[in-house]
Image: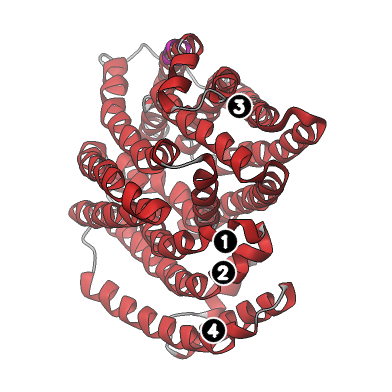
Amino acid sequence: MSLQTDLGNRFRIELVSRIAAICSGMILTVMLARLLEPDGYGLLFFALSILGTAKMVSKLGLGKSTGRYVAKYNTSARGQLPHILEFGLLANLVTIAITCLGLFVFAAEIAALAGEPDLEPLLLVGVLFVLCGTLKTFVRKVLQGFEDIKTAALVKIIDASSKLLFVVALVILGYEAIGALLGYALSLGLAAAVGGIIIYWRYYRSSPRAPRESGLRRRIGEYSIPITATSTANVLDKQVDTILIGFFLTPAAVGFYTVAKQVIESVEAPMASLGFTLSPTYEVQKEQGNADTAARLYEAALTNGLLVYVPAAAGLVLVAEPFVELVFGAEYLEAVPVLQVFALYAVLLAITNITSNGLDYLGRARARAVAKGITAVANVVLNIILIPRHGVVGAAVATVITHSVYTLANLYIINQEFDLRILYILRQSGGIVFITLVMSVAVATVAGSIQGWLTLFSVITVGVLVWAVTAVLTGLLDMQAVRSHLV
């Protein structure tokens, strides 16, 4: 099987898992938004933002560092794999125990500091969320290191499908936000358990055990440090803005912001899937002396991703208001300007999704951590300045500005690793901008006719058709290649 075919198969599997997660996640988002109302919905995601920070402390980059060394040794020295897996898991269990104990002891103080006493019971239940969420992350990263994207996708599907069942059931039974959070934890725990059992039987038991290489544990631990720094900065980017909105504004404002952000995060599935699939392959190809192959893979992923996401972002700006009203209800219309600002964030995420994780596997975690750390701190400062003055829209603007700088840094770093064809990428980008303009004119012309679901889907269909025709005519979209990858 060729590398391209193998990667295509892995990508399709991971994409299916993320689409399943998106579908269940969007259904869950809409149901929770309507069942809990803005205040309860906002309180739940205020708690999840705080717990996301705790989860960052509990995982400390150990899962990804373990996965990186699994990928490095899986073809050259398999006798080291048991040592890698044992150390990674044990170290992660220690960090989980310390974090969960601290969260349990200081839950009341954290809630008081946040100015929301109702957060305390959510944070106590959140101990289970942090435990199960960290283990699920560890399992997925290890499977990614083995390039076992199929099983990693299965873990994600189990989490997504069971989450919808557990969360909705517990909320309908009357447990409200606490029940929703418990449902999140149970689904994460189930997914982690299944993935862990598969790793044990398929890889740990079957791997030969050689004497442990000198310094192996130290290298795994050391490489987790820049990954931890990046993860910490990532939390500042993705969680602290929500925490600051809850601090400066109201739970309802958190709800409006979260609705917009979840819509954007749901549309990143294709590029997130591609990045998850390609990241270990960059390292493998480079180790085998095929840096040019890795570079061409990256260029194709980048340009094809932009071909989809730039026009999609423009279309989202044009239909944001009717979309939010139809999906979430008129009480969430304050999320519309946030969603429109975040449309650009979707394009930036498309780029970083195929770049950032690849840098970690290429040994450039430290450089990425520096870039992420600087932009994350800048994001916090901008949020503190803009939220009191401009509300939730200010938080969205701060995120877009700082993530733009981070994206440029990622592109600069990966260009140091690969000999990228910059002029080729710029020419492709120019064509993508032209296609976006043509499609936007078509959508803007008919967007005023949106009155309900049928007309919304009709307008979206018009946009997709104009995009497809223009992309084919300009030569940027090869339908024969698309069919060959889908079949």
Residue bearing mark 1:
333
The answer to the question of whether label 4 and label 1 lie on touching residues, with beta carbons closer than 8 A, is: no
Q: Report helix, strand or loop for mark 4.
A: helix
Compared with residue 309, is residue 118 higher up or lower down, i.e. above or below? above
The magenta segment is: 94-98
Dot placed on the residue nearer the N-terminal end, 1 or 3: 3
**At label 3, which amino acid type do we have?**
Ala
Residue bearing mark 4:
443
Compared with residue 40, is residue 51 higher up or lower down, i.e. above or below? above
Dot placed on the residue nearer the N-terminal end, 4 or 3: 3
Q: CA distance from mark 2 to mark 3?
A: 38 Å
The answer to the question of whether label 4 and label 3 lie on touching residues, with beta carbons closer than 8 A, is: no
Disc sitting over residue 192 in the figure: 3
Q: Report helix, strand or loop for mark 3.
A: helix
Name the dominant secondary structure of the magenta segment. helix
Q: Nearer the viewer, residue 354 or 162?
A: 162
The answer to the question of whether label 2 and label 1 lie on touching residues, with beta carbons closer than 8 A, is: yes
Q: CA distance from mark 2 to mark 1?
A: 7 Å
The answer to the question of whether label 2 and label 3 lie on touching residues, with beta carbons closer than 8 A, is: no
Q: Position of residue 438 (x, y in %)?
A: 45, 88
Q: At 42% across and 88% down in the image, what residue appears?
A: 474
Dot placed on the residue nearer the N-terminal end, 2 or 3: 3
Compared across the picture, whether 123 is left or right of 158 comes to: left
Density class for disc 4 (Cα within 10 Å; few <14, some 14-19, many ≥20) is: many
- Marks 1 and 3: which is nearer the front? 1
